[in-house]
Image: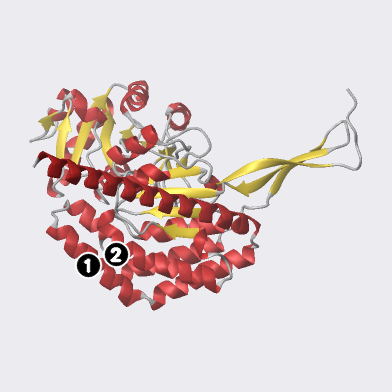
Amino acid sequence: MTLVKSNAATTNSAENTAQEEHLAAYIRGLGEQARAASRVLAAAATQGKSAALQAIAAATDESRQAIKAANAEDMAKAQKNGIDQPLIDRLYLDDKGIDRMIEGLHQVDALVDPVGEVTDLSYQPSGIQVGKMRVPLGVIAMIYESRPNVTVDAASLSIKSGNACILRGGSEAFASNQAIGACVSRGLQAAGLPAAAVQLLNTTNRDAVGELLQLPEFIDVIVPRGGKSLIERISRESMIPVIKHLDGVCHVYVDDAADLNMAADIAFNSKVEKYAVCNALETLLVHKDAATALLPELGKRFAAAGVALRGCERAAALVADMQAAVEQDWYEEYLGPILAVRVVDDIDAAIEHINKYGSQHTDTIVSADYQNTRRFVTEVDSASVMVNTSTQFADGFEYGLGAEVGISTDKIHARGPVGLTGLTSQKYVVYGNGELRHR
């Protein structure tokens, strides 16, 4: 009996090893094909990339029924598996969502192609002329959850910026992503570009992510979009540079020089327009001299919208049914109908709070005082700093980027919404006329 168990264990071990080797070979093959395709994309003319984007848009329009059928399959599985409602909401695709994907493709196509742009040309004393040329990064691997529209956003931005990409969507959107990925492949082929320029993993095996992270010879940058645990894992395990943000702890600060009607509208929109997004308001800071006039009515407005408030002692004294905040609330990204509220003594306290508890994502001030707004945009250390507007505008589409592959809170290479320019780098170009260097 022991021998049978030992043989069974040996067999299982061998099968597991074979599966692991097969997966590693598959992922490595994707990397090799992507690297080869990236050379073609980097040299592609703007007209060729435009033709691909237009063909993808046409294929997406023609495949509406197939995309919606695949999405219905994903939705049914998600509901059966008890996935949280915010994730189900992000997963859903209807004709309106498909229209937005098509519109995004046209908008990216209309953007100026950054690849090949030469800037900062200047003559040096030696006679040589030195400048910088904008070039693609090469191969981008993007790992994301839920939203199937991200497949189109990532593909369109990668193609336009001359990069190949490998996409790994969430298992909950597998069928939707495969249907959309088929449209991308058709569009690339119709334009005479390699289908391997955009490759979608055909497996939901989570070990595939680990394999991707170990291919620095084929992949130049990893872009994760999803929950904090996913991004933390990728940042910890990756051998490849990562463009990321972990949290979206966003703030609205209402100054004593604010128009309070404007402030109420901005705070409300920043929170309620959409809860489960990284640019939603999570902590409201109010100057002590504005709090009495602002918070009671704004508190009623939030209560009517179903938003639970957690505040400091001074805030709770002004708003009925406000729970007492604890220290952890100032760090919290709720991604739901909960808002932390704090009354502060002045702009110094507001800036100090944001730089201590914030996630360097998006923060806004509401004020008519130029000096205070100037101080805020200078001293708040975040990827997007705003004046007199909603945090929900922190988005590649709203910033005129056409789309985004994500929002970066890193400080090196790309920061804020990452669009076309964020997916490129620069190299030096030097022009001469026979000059020689003599030391």
Mark 1 and mark 2 in contact? Answer it, CB < 8 Å: yes
Relative side of 334 to 26, left or right? left
The residue tagged 2 is: 175
Q: Residue at x 90, y 43 (%)?
A: 433
Q: Quadrant of the N terminus?
A: top left
| Quarter holding residue 200 | bottom left
The residue tagged 1 is: 73
Res 397 visible: no
Q: Residue at x 27, y 51 (%)?
A: 273
Q: Quadrant of the C terminus?
A: top right
* Residue 176 position within the rendered picture, expressed as x and y whole percent measured from the top left: 31, 64
* Residue 377 position within the rendered picture, expressed as x and y whole percent measured from the top left: 46, 32
Q: Residue at x 87, y 30 (%)?
A: 125
| Label 1 residue SS | helix
Res 408 visible: yes
C-alpha distance separating marks 1 and 2: 7 Å
The earlier-in-sequence mark between 1 and 2 is 1
Q: Nearer the viewer, residue 335 or 208?
A: 208
Position above or below: 106 against 275: below
